[in-house]
Image (cartoon, rainbow, N blue to C red):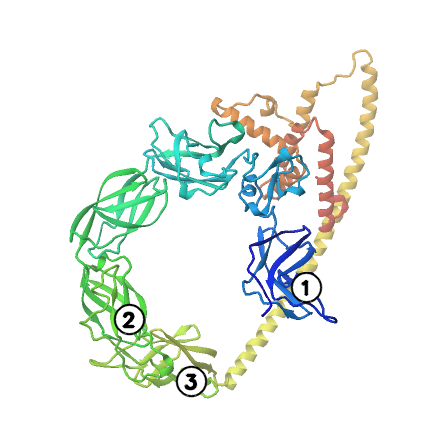
């Protein structure tokens, strides 16, 4: 008799559409007088929406007409929790967990194909004129402009290819080409036999087909005359019409992959060697296979000129075997050989001890150690494994850093411990993972005490620093073992003397506060800070000597300042005297110029009367300009044609034309002139030549030349004011 909702088919509600939601139920109570009715509670993206509901009878309830909405276009549909509430706060049981599925036709359906492949129960159609996916009643176009799923008019036009992978492959074929795009058919039959890649038939594969979005096809064999081409897909059954044809903008290329060598050329018979094969076009095609005789080499990755694989154990034992590579259906021909050699062996480890934190060096002796690419040393304790690196020195020796023992430091172990397993990880060689011939043992870590209770140790210069603790010398079977300690005072190391409970450090010549840092194996510990202070005060003799030296220095500085002041005064007087002489000279020159000008006017009046009949002898413009701009030069290079070798003439003329464009740029020209004037070796003669050449170029643009001259004159005035020169010196040049 418990009220509950019955299982319902998927409840689909489009957003922004007013629609009731009818639910089947049983044992729904009839609200009595004073009781509230039914409500539907929908939780949409965290927000609760209450909708009045109507009870038809004990087996049916309906959420009243309401529209719903959710944010975002990332989800085409959104499942929403639905609860039916009676009398304000009593929830009707929903054992089937019925949910309302809100959906948007246009979310994640930006093309016709994606729209028509949507769930037919959604009722989405493609509105052609508006190029959008929507409900049928929301498209304002005539019915012949609608595309409906499974309808008479349900074929999308204008398919488009957006992505092709791979873009290269062998001519032998077999390459699986993945074509992604839009409107690539809604049924596999529509594209079957209708795909060509670079004019070669490509057979679609049903398992790789995603309606409207993706086609995977297998390439056929290409002729030697075929090199490249685009991808063509025709959607439909029968003759292909242009509006159903798609051509890619990218091209597919046929290449010839080649292999040249492999490295390393040998490895252990147990396998695990990472082999690198080099060549060309090795990233073409879709599938690569490497065979060591009849044994596969596990492919790892590849690039255009390389590919790598991992060898397996050799079923044929030692010796050389042939290596072959195939890309899709192309067999790459090259006589490559790989040699399987005997697995490495370990004969000796020295020393056979370390500390819990590891990272102490051991020398390993054995055979064939140089065939391992990345040798590792391992320890296992309580089902926890640790690894560390080894460095191969030769085929018979390598230097390893012992891994730490995975032991809980909280246990405060004081006794030596043997690992459950101790060995080496050498590619896939399993026989050395756990050595039975070694008695490797771990001793407790060295422990340091603080330098002082305050953490700061006061010292005098030259005094030794004593670090106290325990386990500094592990009690090995061959006597006390030696560990490599490093103690840093600040950033300087100190000389050490080691005993069982002390490290005696001869401190470097330092003063001030410095952090002490001790390192051993995988341990790094700071016992505190040392403060080195000097308590030797200066003697009275030294103080008197320093005072005398200071007084002498002050006297010398005073003498120098007096001499400098006197010299400066003399210089100022000399400068003023020269200035007065220059002013007098300029006044005399100006007076002489006035007199000469008056005489010249008289001479011109006399000349004018003489030239009444013959006229004034004017020079032509070219001759006058050359005499003004380049005085004393009869044949200047600007008057001659460009004299460069024929093969360079075009480049030189192009360069001169570009430079001429830059000269007509005011910013460039001003920067160019200022840069030249900043050079120390730029003489007055050079300035005149450059100015004449620039004016030659700008004869036809005198307004532009005048504007540049105004800027240069403004700069000259500003510099003259900054240097506080006499105004008469401004235009002396």
The answer to whether the residues at label 1 and label 2 have Cβ atoms under 8 Å apart is no
Tag 2's secondary structure?
strand
Question: What x and y, as percent, mark residue 695?
Answer: 67, 30
Residue at (56% x, 37% y) in the render: 151
Front residue of this view, candidates 86 and 183? 86
Q: Report the disc number at residue 39.
A: 1
User: Quick check: 713 above or below 72?
Assistant: above
Question: What x and y, as percent, mark residue 36?
Answer: 72, 68
Residue at (81% x, 32% y) in the render: 595
- Of marks 1 and 3, which one's residue comes earlier in the chain? 1
Residue labelled with disc 2? 379
**Separation of marks 2 and 3 at Cα, in angstroms:** 32 Å
Residue labelled with disc 3? 450
Front residue of this view, candidates 521 and 146? 146
Tag 3's secondary structure?
loop
Question: What x and y, as percent, mark residue 540?
Answer: 52, 86
Residue at (69% x, 69% y) in the render: 88
Question: What x and y, as percent, mark residue 673?
Answer: 64, 39
Residue at (54% x, 79% y) in the render: 546
């Amino acid at each position: 008799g418990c009220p509950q909702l019955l299982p319902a088919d998927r409840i689909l509600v489009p957003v922004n559409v007013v629609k009731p939601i009818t639910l089947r139920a049983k044992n729904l109570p009839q609200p009595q007088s004073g009781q509230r009715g039914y409500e539907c509670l929908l939780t949409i993206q965290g927000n609760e929406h209450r909708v009045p509901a109507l009870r038809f009878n004990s087996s049916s309830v309906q959420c009243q007409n309401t529209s719903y909405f959710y944010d975002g276009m990332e989800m085409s549909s959104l499942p929403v929790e639905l609860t039916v509430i009676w009398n304000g706060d009593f929830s009707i049981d929903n054992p089937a967990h019925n949910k309302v599925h809100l959906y948007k036709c246009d979310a994640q359906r930006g093309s016709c194909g994606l729209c028509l492949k949507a769930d037919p129960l959604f009722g989405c159609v493609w509105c052609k004129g508006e190029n959008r996916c929507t409900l049928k009643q929301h498209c304002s176009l005539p019915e012949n402009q609608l595309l409906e799923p499974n309808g008479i008019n349900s074929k999308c036009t204008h398919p488009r290819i957006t992505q092709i992978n791979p873009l290269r492959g062998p001519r032998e074929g077999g390459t699986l080409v993945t074509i992604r795009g839009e409107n690539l058919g809604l049924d596999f039959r529509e594209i079957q036999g209708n795909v060509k890649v670079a004019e070669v038939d490509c057979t679609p594969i049903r398992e790789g087909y995603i309606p409207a979005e993706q086609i995977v096809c297998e390439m056929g064999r290409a002729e030697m005359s075929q090199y490249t081409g685009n991808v063509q897909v025709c959607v439909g059954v029968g003759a292909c019409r242009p509006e159903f044809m798609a051509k890619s903008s990218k091209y597919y290329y046929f290449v010839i992959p080649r292999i040249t060598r492999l490295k390393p050329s040998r490895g252990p018979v147990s396998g695990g060697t990472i082999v690198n094969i080099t060549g060309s076009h090795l990233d073409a095609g879709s599938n690569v296979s490497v065979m060591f005789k009849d044994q596969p080499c596990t492919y790892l990755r590849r690039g255009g000129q390389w590919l790598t694989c991992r060898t397996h154990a050799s079923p044929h034992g030692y010796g050389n075997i042939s290596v072959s590579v195939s890309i899709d259906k192309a067999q790459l021909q090259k006589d490559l050989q790989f040699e399987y050699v005997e697995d490495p062996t370990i004969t000796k480890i020295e020393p056979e001890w370390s500390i819990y934190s590891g990272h102490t060096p051991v020398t390993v002796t054995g055979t064939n150690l140089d065939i391992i690419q990345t040798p590792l040393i391992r320890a296992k304790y309580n089902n926890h494994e640790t690894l560390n690196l080894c460095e191969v020195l030769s085929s018979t020796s390598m230097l390893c850093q012992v891994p730490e023992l995975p032991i809980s430091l909280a246990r405060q172990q004081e006794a030596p411990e043997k690992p459950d397993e101790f060995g080496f990880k050498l590619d896939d060689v399993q026989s050395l993972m756990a050595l039975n011939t070694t008695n490797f043992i771990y001793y407790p870590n060295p422990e340091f005490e603080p330098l002082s209770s305050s953490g700061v140790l006061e010292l005098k210069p030259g005094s030794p620093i004593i670090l106290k603790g325990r386990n500094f010398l592990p009690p090995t079977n061959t006597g006390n073992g030696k560990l490599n300690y490093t103690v840093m005072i600040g950033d300087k190391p100190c000389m050490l003397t080691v005993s069982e409970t002390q490290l005696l450090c001869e401190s470097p010549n330092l003063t001030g506060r410095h952090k002490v840092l001790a390192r051993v194996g995988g341990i790094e510990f700071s016992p505190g800070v040392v403060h080195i202070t000097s308590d030797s005060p200066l003697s009275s003799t030294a103080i008197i000597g320093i005072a005398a030296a200071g007084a002498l220095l002050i006297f010398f500085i005073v003498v120098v300042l007096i001499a400098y002041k006197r010299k400066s005064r003399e210089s100022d007087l000399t400068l003023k005297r020269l200035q007065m002489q220059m002013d007098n000279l300029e006044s005399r020159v100006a007076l002489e110029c006035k007199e000469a000008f008056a005489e010249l006017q008289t001479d011109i009046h006399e000349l004018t009367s003489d030239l009444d009949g013959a006229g004034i002898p004017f020079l032509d413009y070219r001759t006058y300009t050359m005499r003004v701009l380049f005085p004393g030069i009869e044949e200047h290079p600007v008057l001659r044609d460009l004299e460069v070798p024929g093969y360079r003439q075009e480049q030189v003329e192009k360069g001169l034309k570009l430079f001429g464009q830059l000269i007509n740029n005011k910013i460039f020209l001003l920067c160019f002139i200022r840069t030249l004037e900043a050079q120390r070796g730029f003489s007055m003669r050079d300035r005149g030549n450059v100015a004449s050449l620039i004016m030659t170029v700008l004869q036809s643009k005198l307004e532009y030349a005048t504007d540049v001259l105004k800027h240069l004159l403004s700069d000259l005035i500003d510099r003259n004011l900054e240097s506080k020169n006499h105004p008469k010196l401004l235009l002396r040049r």
